[in-house]
Image: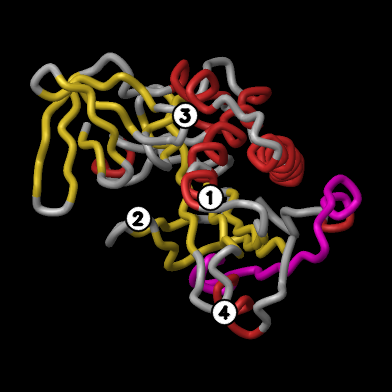
Amino acid sequence: MSGMPFQLTKIRQATSLDSIEYFESTESTNTSALQRIKADSTVDNVLVLTEQQKAGRGRGNHRWHADSGALTFSLIKYFPELRGNALASLGLVTGIAVAEALEPWLPQSVQLKWPNDIFLHRKKLGGILIETTQESPQTLVIGIGINVNNSLANAPFDVASKSISITDVTDTDIPLTDVLIEILQQLENFYGQVIANTADIPSLWNPRCMLNGSEVDFVQGDVRFQGHCHGVQVDGALLLEIESEIRPFYSGSAVI
C-alpha cells in the first residue's frame, strides 16, 4: 500500500466527529488519546488515527502490533448519562457494532469472544481496549484494531495460526476509509441505543458468541473455573454454569 491510506475529509463529512488527529506512526493510539484527555478533560468526540501502531496495548499484558494495512484507531467519547453497568456494557456493544460494520466485506459472520475480541474462522481478526482516566472517568478511550489489508499468511506460525485478516479471506484489499466510516457510524448507532436504554445486548451478542454452548476454562485473578457458557446477560456479564449453578462474571478471561 502506498500513499496516504485515509481520506480525512471524507471521514469528517460522513461522521459527527469534532476532530481527527492523524499520525503516520505512533506507539499507541490509546496512549495518545489518554494524554489528550489529561491535557484537556473536556475533550470529546475525537478520533485518534494512525497508519502504523508500534506498541499497541491489549488487556492485561497483551500487546497489539499493527503493520501498515491494519485499521488502528481510538475514539474519545464522553458519556455523561451512563453509570455502572451501562457504562461497563459499552465494551460488548462496541464489539457488536464492529461486527456489524465488517460483515459487508466478508462472506462469513463475525464472531465475538467475551469481552473484547473479534474473531473470524475462530482466528482473531481484531480487538477492543476501553480505558479511562482519573481526570474524567466518564470520558472513554475506545481503542479498536482490525486486521484488514495486512495479510498474516506469511507471519510467524504462532501468529498466523491464531490470527487472520480480511484480505486473507477475500484475497482483495479494501479501502480503510470506508471500513472506518462504517465502524464509526455503527458505533454512533449502537451507543445511541445504550444511552436510550434500548440496546438488547443478549439478543445482539449471543448469536455471535463463540463461547456460547461450549465448555470454557475461565481465569479470574489467581482462580481458574471450568463451566458451560450460556452467553451474556443484559448487563454484559458472561454466564457460566458451574456445578449446576449459572453464575455471572463481570471480569476475567476465557481460555480457548
Q: Label 4 amino acid?
A: Gln
Does 245 sit left or right of 190 as displayed?
A: left
Crowdedness of circle 3 by 10 Å Cα count: few (<14), some, many (20+)? some
Q: Secondary structure at mark 1?
A: helix
Please determine whether, in this image, residue 208 is positioned above or below residue 97. Answer: above
Crowdedness of circle 2 by 10 Å Cα count: few (<14), some, many (20+)? some
The residue that appears at 87% across and 50% down in the rendered structure is 10
The residue that appears at 59% across and 36% down in the rendered structure is 98
Q: Label 3 amino acid?
A: Val
Disc 1 to disc 4, C-alpha distance: 21 Å
Labels 3, 4: front one: 3
Res. 144 visible in picture: yes
Contact? badges 3 and 2 (CB < 8 Å): no
Q: Looking at the image, is mark 1 or mark 2 earlier in the sequence?
A: 2
Labels 1, 2: front one: 1
Contact? badges 4 and 2 (CB < 8 Å): no
Crowdedness of circle 4 by 10 Å Cα count: few (<14), some, many (20+)? few
Does 252 sit left or right of 71 as displayed?
A: left
Res. 179 visible in picture: no
Per the rendering, the mark at residue 59 is 2
Q: Looking at the image, is mark 1 or mark 3 earlier in the sequence?
A: 1
> Quick one: which residue is furthest to the bottom in this view?
39
The residue range painted magenta reads 10-32
Name the residue that disc number 4 marks: 35
Please determine whether, in this image, residue 124 is positioned above or below residue 65. Answer: above
Please determine whether, in this image, residue 246 is positioned above or below residue 68. Answer: above
Quadrant in which residue 107 is drawn: top right
Q: Looking at the image, is mark 1 or mark 4 earlier in the sequence?
A: 4
Residue 61, horizontal then vertical, whole percent: 27, 62
Query: Is 13 included in the stretch rendered in magenta?
Result: yes
